[in-house]
Image (cartoon, helix red, strand yellow):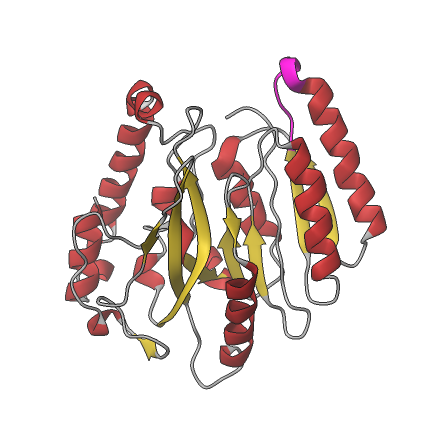
């Protein structure tokens, strides 16, 4: 994956808070505008980590500009932004770096092609603040996401109202049946940061479709969940250059098969831990 991978890690200072990790590739305007806006809005409650990666010579000039922007933003917002420069390792490498450097209690991945809705973001931050420090530890928060298809006015909301209990703690034993094609995706989850580290997840570098691993491998370690029925994440689809474009996916079928095999091996190697809970076992098997 060529270009720049950026992680924005947004964490409440008291206590450590939720973190948003976003991968940005060759998005000069996003790096300047989106990060500047976030720094202004969250200056007192956020820690923003910008991870920039080395890239090919054909976009070296743009890359150098982005590196300068990252350093400038760190100087202008030293209590909010940290700039980290590293060799290019693809989307998985950016997420790995985000997890390793995260300072907040919760961790959220947002791709720079996409966006989150401010009202839902504020509601999620408030809910995480309420739940932090209570008698139970939350491992995974789930919210809705929206398929924002290019050039279409109507967008499909992916919710979990008939599958998950709402506005309360629950476990795998409390969930209902997931229909085919209706799964917990990267767009809908926020993990506890320490859980991601404890499960030892390390996404492959220079590999596409690793988001499947991100929402698969931590699941046996997730004991408590909470579903907040808000439309938080807007997932943009329909552009010709996207990795999920049908033509591109066919050309990269080897990448998807590689990720699928990693998931199958993980399921087999951790069968003892997974099979303890029947519904967890069923869900992970259906996800393959």
Q: Position of residue 132 (x, y in %)?
A: 52, 77
Residue 262, image quadrant: top left
Q: Is residue 17 above or below residue 69?
A: below
Residue 49 appears in the figure: yes
User: 267 or 88, which is in the foreground?
Assistant: 88
Q: Nearer the viewer, residue 242 or 153?
A: 153
Quadrant of the frame with the C terminus: top left
State yes or no: residue 86 in magenta. Answer: no
Q: Indicate left or right for 50 with 88 as reference.
A: right
* In-front residue for pair 266/119: 119
Residue 94 coordinates in the image, percent (x, y)? 55, 40
> How many numbered discs?
0
Q: Where, by quadrant of the figure, is residue 13 drawn?
A: bottom right
Residue at image location 74% in from the left, 52% down from the top:
81
Residue under the point 68% across and 58% down: 47
Residue at figure coordinates x 64%, y 74% from the top left? 15
Is any atom of residue 199 visible in this view?
A: no
Q: From the viewer's perspective, is 85 left or right of 280?
A: right
Q: Residue at x 39, y 32 (%)?
A: 238
* Residue at the bottom extreme of this rendering: 135
Q: Residue furthest front?
A: 153
Residue 125 on image: x %, y % = 55, 69
Up-down: is 73 above or below 226?
above
Residue positioned most to the right: 75
Name the side, left or right, on which 74 lies relative to 206.
Answer: right
The stretch of residues the image draws in magenta is 53-59
> Is 56 inside the magenta-drawn segment?
yes
In the rendered image, residue 180, in percent from the top left (x then y), is placed at 16, 49
The answer to whether 215 is drawn above or below residue 279 in the figure is above
């Amino acid at each position: 994956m060529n270009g720049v991978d950026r992680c924005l890690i947004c964490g409440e200072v008291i206590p450590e808070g939720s973190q948003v990790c976003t991968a940005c590739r060759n998005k000069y305007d996003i790096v300047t505008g989106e990060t500047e806006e976030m720094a202004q809005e969250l200056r007192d409650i956020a820690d923003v980590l910008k991870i920039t990666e080395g890239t090919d010579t054909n976009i070296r000039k743009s890359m150098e500009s982005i590196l300068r922007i990252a350093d400038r933003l760190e100087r202008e917002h030293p209590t909010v932004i940290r700039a980290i420069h590293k060799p290019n390792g693809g989307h998985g490498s950016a997420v790995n770096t985000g997890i390793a450097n995260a300072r907040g209690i919760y961790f959220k991945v947002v791709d720079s092609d996409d966006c989150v809705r401010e009202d839902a973001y504020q509601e999620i931050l408030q809910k995480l603040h309420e739940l932090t420090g209570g008698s139970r530890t939350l491992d995974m928060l789930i919210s809705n996401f929206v398929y924002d298809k290019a050039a279409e006015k109507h967008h499909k909301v992916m919710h979990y109202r008939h599958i998950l209990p709402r506005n309360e703690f629950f476990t795998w034993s409390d969930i209902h049946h997931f229909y085919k094609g209706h799964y917990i995706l990267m767009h809908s989850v926020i993990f506890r940061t320490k859980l991601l580290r404890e499960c030892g997840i390390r996404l492959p570098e220079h590999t596409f479709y690793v988001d499947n691993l991100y929402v698969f491998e931590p699941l046996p370690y997730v004991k408590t969940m909470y579903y907040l029925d808000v439309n938080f994440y807007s997932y943009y689809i329909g552009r010709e250059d996207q990795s999920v474009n049908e033509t591109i996916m066919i050309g990269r079928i080897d990448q998807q098969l590689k990720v699928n095999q990693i998931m199958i091996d993980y399921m087999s190697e951790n069968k003892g831990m997974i099979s303890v809970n029947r519904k967890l076992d069923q869900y992970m098997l259906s996800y393959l």
